[in-house]
Image (cartoon, rainbow, N blue to C red):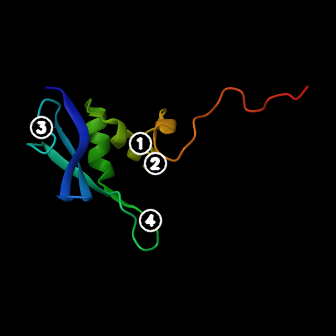
Amino acid sequence: MVVAMRLQRFGSRHSPFYRIVVANRRAPRDGKFIERVGTYNPFPRNDMTKVCSMNFDRIKYWLSVGAQPSDRVSYLLGLAGILPPHPNRHLLKGTPPASSEETQSEE
C-alpha cells in the first residue's frame, strides 16, 4: 500500500481549513484516511500569523516507514524544520525565482 501525507479540505466556500492526514494514495482527497497528524489554516489571524499544528512524533514515524508527503505538506514540514526546505519554493506565490546570475557586470 502506497501511503501519502496530504491535505484534506474542510470549511465552507472561500474559507478553507485543512487537516494534514496520512492516507492511501488511491483514496479520494476528502475520503478515508489512516491517521490525522495535524491541521493548517491558510488564512492569517489578526496578528498576521498562520496557524499550523502538527504531531511531530507521528509525522516522523510515518516518514520513517515510507510515507510520501505532497508538495504543500513537504513545504509546511520544511518550514517546521522536519524536512529540508522545499526545493520548489519559487513556484509558490510571492517568492521570486532564484536566478543563476545574481548580478550582471556593467561594461
Point out the tag, 2 or 4, that comes first from the N-terminus: 4
Which label lies toward us, 3 or 1?
A: 3
> Callout 4: helix, strand or loop?
loop
Point out the tag, 4 or 1, that comes first from the N-terminus: 4
Q: Left or right: where does residue 75 sit relative to residue 65?
A: right
> Horizontal and vertical percent for residue 38?
26, 54
Mark 4 is surrounded, within 10 Å at the Cα level, by few (under 14), some (14 to 19) or many (20 or more) other residues, namely few
Which residue shows up at 39% across the image and 47% down it? 76
> Horizontal and vertical percent for residue 28?
12, 37
From the image, tell me which residue sits under label 4. 49
The amino acid on which the numbered mark 4 sits, given as a three-letter code, is: Thr
Q: CA distance from mark 2 to mark 4?
A: 13 Å
> Horizontal and vertical percent for residue 98?
61, 34
Identity of the residue furthest to the right in this view: 107
Point out the tag, 2 or 3, that comes first from the N-terminus: 3
In-front residue for pair 79/56: 79
Q: CA distance from mark 4 to mark 1?
A: 17 Å
> Horizontal and vertical percent for residue 36?
19, 50
Question: In the displayed structure, would residue 25 be above or below residue 41?
Answer: above
Which label lies toward us, 2 or 4?
A: 4
> Callout 3: helix, strand or loop?
loop
From the image, tell me which residue sits under label 1. 75
Q: CA distance from mark 4 to mark 3?
A: 30 Å
The amino acid on which the numbered mark 2 sits, given as a three-letter code, is: Leu
Question: In the displayed structure, would residue 35 be above or below residue 25?
Answer: below
Proximity of marks 2 and 1: CB atoms separated by less than 8 Å: yes
Quarter of the rendering containing residue 107: top right
Point out the tag, 4 or 3, that comes first from the N-terminus: 3
From the image, tell me which residue sits under label 2. 79
